Image (cartoon, coloured by chain):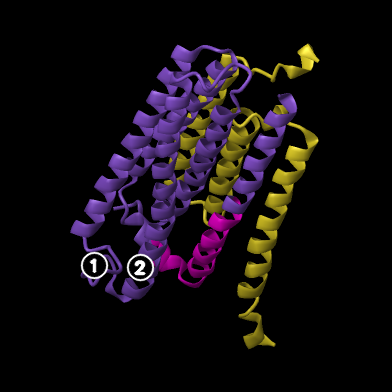
Chain colours: A purple, B yellow
Amino acid sequence: MEQQTEASLLGMWTFLVTEILFFGGALTAYLVYRNWYPDAFALASYEIPIMPGAINTAVLIFSSLTMALAVHFAQTGDRGKTMLFIVLTSILGAAFLGIKAYEYHEKYVEHFIPGFGLPFEFPANPEYTNAARIFYSLYFVLTGLHALHMIIGLGIMTWMFIWVKNGTITQEYYAPVEIAGLYWHFVDIVWIFLFPLLYLIGRHVHHVG
Amino acid sequence: MSDNSKHHVVPLSTYYLIFLALMVGTALTWWVATIDLGAMNNVIMLTIAVTKATLVILFFMHVRYASKLTWTIILGSVFWLLILLVLTMNDYLTRSWLHYG
């Protein structure tokens, strides 16, 4: 059983490696364009309110803690607490997506959506409109892919809840919960990088006034 | 065998400590982002992010207690990620040199 657990964890890590390089590709695009338009990127980033992003960072870190606790109680064979912490993790994940949806709506109201034939305006500096459009394209691709991973994560949490409840998960066979945890923490790590790269790069230049 | 078949169970206090460190790291990034340190802003920001990610990987994802094979796979992915980032920027950051040559 130990060997099977080890093998399945290794398989999950192999999948996560492909995920790291997948997000790595998107981050490379960000890096290249930010290098071309540093000032426009700083200003466009400054236009994003920091509070919802910071709250979401805290929410995700908190959800990683509850996820780690869920795995812990699966390992020690406490089914009740495993279910409790899977539910808490799901609630925090849903809260993250709710705040993200609010942010997307704000972008829609402020005309910061670069696509779907919607009006795009960058009144902070109209000369930067095209570069700001690239910044917000990257913002939506990166946060959108991240949000998609969160939605899949919520599906996995539901699946794990059912498996713990119906007794599929036991103290010996807890590997599925641990693997679900690896996925959840990975998505948290992606956000750990997205938060500073998207929300914080313009603060030190523009925060005065 | 019975001793081996028990997976390493991390004490709860470790999880709380890591959680606290991650929260402090987040607050620190935000605070540093408002101070103008020029190019150092990026360096500090990414150092904090990498530190936070490392804490999550080592403790929340149990890699600290994982096999050497797992370590190899993870370090391999970091290596490939660096190839992706460094070689790409090696191109883009040096293109302007052509104008002076």
Give the residues drawn in magenta, as a range: A20-42
Quarter-of-image position of residue A89 = top left
Residue B1 lies in the magenta-colored region: no
Q: Nearer the viewer, residue A87 or A155?
A: A155
Main structural element of the magenta stretch: helix, strand or loop? helix
- State the mark number for residue A132: 2
Do discs 1 and 2 share a chain?
yes
Circle 1 chain: A
Horizontal and vertical percent position of residue B93: 62, 72
- A33 inside magenta stretch: yes
Secondary-structure class at tag 1: loop
Q: Give the mark, 1 or 2, whose residue is nearer the N terminus.
A: 1
Q: Please, is residue A105 above or below residue A68 in the view?
A: below
- Is any atom of residue A58 visible in this view? no
Chain hosting mark 2: A
Q: Nearer the viewer, residue A101 or A12?
A: A12
Q: Residue at x 62, y 87 (%)?
A: B99
Q: Pick whichever, B86 or A37, lies toward us.
A: B86
The residue singled out by tag 1 in the image is A123
Measure the alpha-carbon separation of dots 1 and 2: 11 Å
- Identify the residue shown where x is 42% and y is 26%: A162
- Residue A97's x, y, as percent? 33, 42
Amino acid at dot 1: Pro
Q: Under tag 2, what secondary structure?
A: helix
